[in-house]
Image: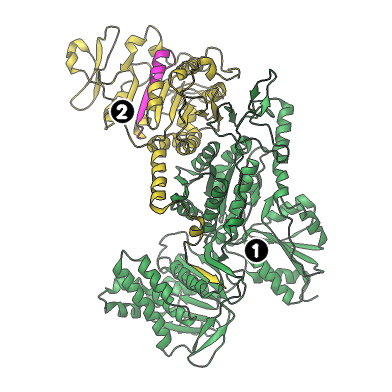
Amino acid sequence: MTTSVPVTTRKDWSSDQEVRWCPGCGDFSILAALQMLLPELGVRRETTVFLSGIGCAARFPYYMNTYGLHSIHGRAPAIATGLATTRPDLDVWVVTGDGDALSIGGNHLIHALRRNVRLTILMFNNQIYGLTKGQYSPTSEVAKVTKSTPFGSLDTPFNPVSLALGAEASFVARTHDMDRAHMQEIFRRAHEHKGAAFVEIYQNCNVFNDGAFEKITGREARASMLIPLRHGEPIRFGAEGERGVIQRRDGRLEIVDVADVGEDALLVHDETRADPSVAFALSRLARGPYEPTPIGVFRAVERPEYGEEMRRQIIEAQEQRGMGDLAALLRSGSSWVVD
Amino acid sequence: MTTGTRRTTDQLDDVVVRFAGGSGDGMQLTGDRFTTSSALVGNDLSTFPDFPAEIRAPAGTLAGVSAFQVHISDHDILTPGDAPNVLVAMNPAALRANVGVLPKGGTILVNVDAFDERSLAKAGYEANPLTDGSLSSFTVYEVPMTSLTQEVCKEAGIKPRDAERSKNFFALGLVSWLFTRPVEPTLAWIQRRFADRPQVAEANTRAFRAGYHFGETAELFESNYEVRPAAFEKGEYVQVSGNQAIAWGLITAARLAGLPLFLGSYPITPASDILHELSRRKEFGVWTLQAEDEIAGVGAALGAAFGGALGVTTTSGPGLDLKAETIGLAVNLELPLVIIDVQRGGPSTGLPTKTEQADLLQALYGRHGEAPVPVLAPSTPSQCFDIAIKAARLAIKYRTPVIVLSDGYLANGAEPWRLPDLTTLEPIDPGFATEPNHRADDGTAVFWPYLRDEVTLARPWAPPGVPGLEHRIGGLEKADGSGDVSYDPANHDRMVRLRAEKIAGIVREVPPVVVDDEGEAVLLVIGWGSTFGAIATAVQRARARGLRVARAHLDHLNPLPANLGDVLRRYPKVLVPEINLGQLSRLLRAEYLVDVQSLCRVQGVPFRASEIESAIVAILGAAQ
């Protein structure tokens, strides 16, 4: 029985719960972008699940009029793995933050990515702990002064895109909370991806880390500081496209003036490259959100999806051995009869 | 064992054989084969594998000794035996580590080839025990097992070094002759097991036959022995271990509920065999995930349960520590989840391959907040099957995590099991929500995920996929009924009590505790879990001495049976043997204000019936 997907609007996807993020939080624009996009994706509310861990971002499921599970700190990818593998009919979204995904839940994230579980993972990166009121996070810059690091933080931050690529992710992208259209384009791509899709969203925490991404996502800065990645196109940016990225003979990437090298010398973005090294190099182009930074899809490759493979093994076993026979199972060792 | 006339077969009621060797000597396999052929003869049996945590512990050292004890009998037995009658020692270390438990007059079969100076020194012997008279109170048979094995293999062109590995089959052959076990099942098994390694199959076959013939022809043994079939109830039997029975119970429960079975697990001794067994059974629609860690194992199981599967995780103590937070989440989400804890020696890494019962209070209380869960414990390997089904049944019916406390002894120990009639097992109704269950103020039909069943207090289970039932749940406190996030103080108090009341109400599913009392007993011995066999045997022996003693055993540790308080108060004295420092005792005292006495031993091995018997005697006096 196939029935057409009902026509919905943003309102249908919004729950009746009052949204309780701080006024001005970047999370609002991400929520809005997604609620507006979902009616366009041809999906149903009843087969959509939002799953989260702990943190400000993790409140997301309460605001979606879908099935939702607000779980415990860091564990959302693990819990989602059990759900998504056994229920291929569902669209499972994992909403997480930099602390949830990369600190307490780092292990689950990398394993969900390497297994290629069919999950759309949205990681809100605000480079701070918001819900616990302002401690540094695993993406905070070195020397960050916070309540827990009054003398400055010592730890080298993670680069989430590099990390995801290193964890064998088949889909890795980055977007930011100041550009709804870009977010929606990336969310749409991530949702279409077969397997685990990892999206880093630069998100402003206006209370504890205001302006962390201002240098690159501010309205005036964007053209010169964001490097849009478009599959099959030369990588260039700037108001007039006057700057670009080239790959040196030794493999290093470098930002150059297009006028100096000529258009043909620019690196053409290929998100489907099997070898993730160029994607990784792109993720290292900026040392932090104060230098020209690539956004868009870094990598989108096809790889067997975990749940589908698990299901295949079950079906093959049933084809070869027949549906399991309990009586035979209990006799799988030697049995004897007492008369 | 008695001495018979030469080359005759004598009858024995029962016998306990202990195979001991280095950890690479194949003692577990040897013991297992002996057990299987005894099962096929129709003996009652009980086994106790006892091995080090190291896969190949240093050869020849005491630390590396691996043993397998099996008790076979022509009557109903409940334990693997207090002490062996026959010890098979493959090297000096195996002798030294085990001779202490052998009673005077016991029989020792040694592989004399292994008693060279170096091996003796490694085992810490200053003089050769075979010649210094220290074994004079035993009957010792010195058999050159290694060289005889090499000899018979040489004829087939098998190099001595390769042949040496088959010496355990020589021992098995010899013991098979000594106890008149049939040879065909073992020969057939060797062919099957080593089908892809014909030379190994040949060597093992030759060694096994050589051992058997050695017993028959060498003028060493005056007689061999027969242990006749036990008088079993009619029916079909298999030999089953606790881990196997748990895996089969889970598969059966999923079938009874019509749900897919999802196991999220991380390898850990002694629970891994459940993961292995379930991973082989994909044709039953079993999903197994070897997770990245213990937390992910239980998390994935909970996620699968949210999606409408029977979610299960299996672990041992260290893993139960790690899963605590997720079990607490499951308490709050009120979703079905089965947690199997195969207990081992603790704390921390403790004694991974040894048995213990010290996770009881953790299972009951080891979570923050008021987070009660039902706790069940099987008492024998075969009962693991029933307990696994019961755990799943309670989890599904009451939408709650349920903890099953097995242990290393049950997990690896085996016994005959009369196969149940599967058609008599009651189906389990998942009772998924199908439609809205509440009218909002404006009259619209809505779904309230925390609207409870009036009797069971269980909330609806509404896996995603049903239009109109979209809802959000989570670890935050929920408003009674609607399930919305609520910080209201009175609501929290109500929800804490409702969750507790729901679990306490499961007492209606708990059969009253049955007391085995022949009348006028003045002492009740009560236990839980794997101490069942030792307690029951000890009580039998105490009665034979004329002591008035009763016995009861608990499968349900939470909720406890409704009649337990009355039962405890009926007896002037109560003794609780446990392989911990008195966890059930503490619970019984707290719940019922009964001054129970503890018998505690935490040595990583099961109780011997004689230890409990002595405690009974000490309490009641030698005779009444």
* Kind of residue sitting beneath label 2: Phe
Say which mark, if any, is on residue A81: none
Q: Which residues are magenta?
A: A168-186
Is B445 one of the magenta-colored residues?
no
Is B621 placed left or right of A71 in the picture? Answer: right
Q: Chain for mark 2?
A: A
* Kind of residue sitting beneath label 1: Phe
* Residue farthest along the front direction in this orientation: A1
Say which mark, if any, is on residue A280: 2
Is B402 placed left or right of B564 in the picture? Answer: left
Q: Is residue B296 above or below residue A129?
A: below
Mark toward the viewer: 2 or 1? 1
Give me the residue at 60% from left, 70% from top.
B234
Query: Chain B: what color?
Result: green
**Image quadrant of residue B165?**
bottom left
Q: Is residue B570 above or below residue A242?
A: below
Callout 1 secondary element: helix
Is B167 placed left or right of B514 in the picture? Answer: left
Query: Chain A: what color?
Result: yellow
Say which mark, if any, is on residue B532: 1
Does residue A55 show up?
no
Is A182 one of the magenta-colored residues?
yes
Residue B227, position as x, y percentages in the image: 55, 80
Give me the residue at 55% from left, 89% from top.
B3
Q: Nearer the viewer, residue B400 or B569?
A: B400
Q: Nearer the viewer, residue B588 or B194?
A: B194
Callout 2 secondary element: helix
Residue A146, position as x, y percentages in the image: 51, 22
Residue A197, position as x, y percentages in the image: 39, 29
The answer to the question of whether label 2 and label 1 lie on touching residues, with beta carbons closer than 8 A, is no
Q: Nearer the viewer, residue B260 or B481?
A: B260
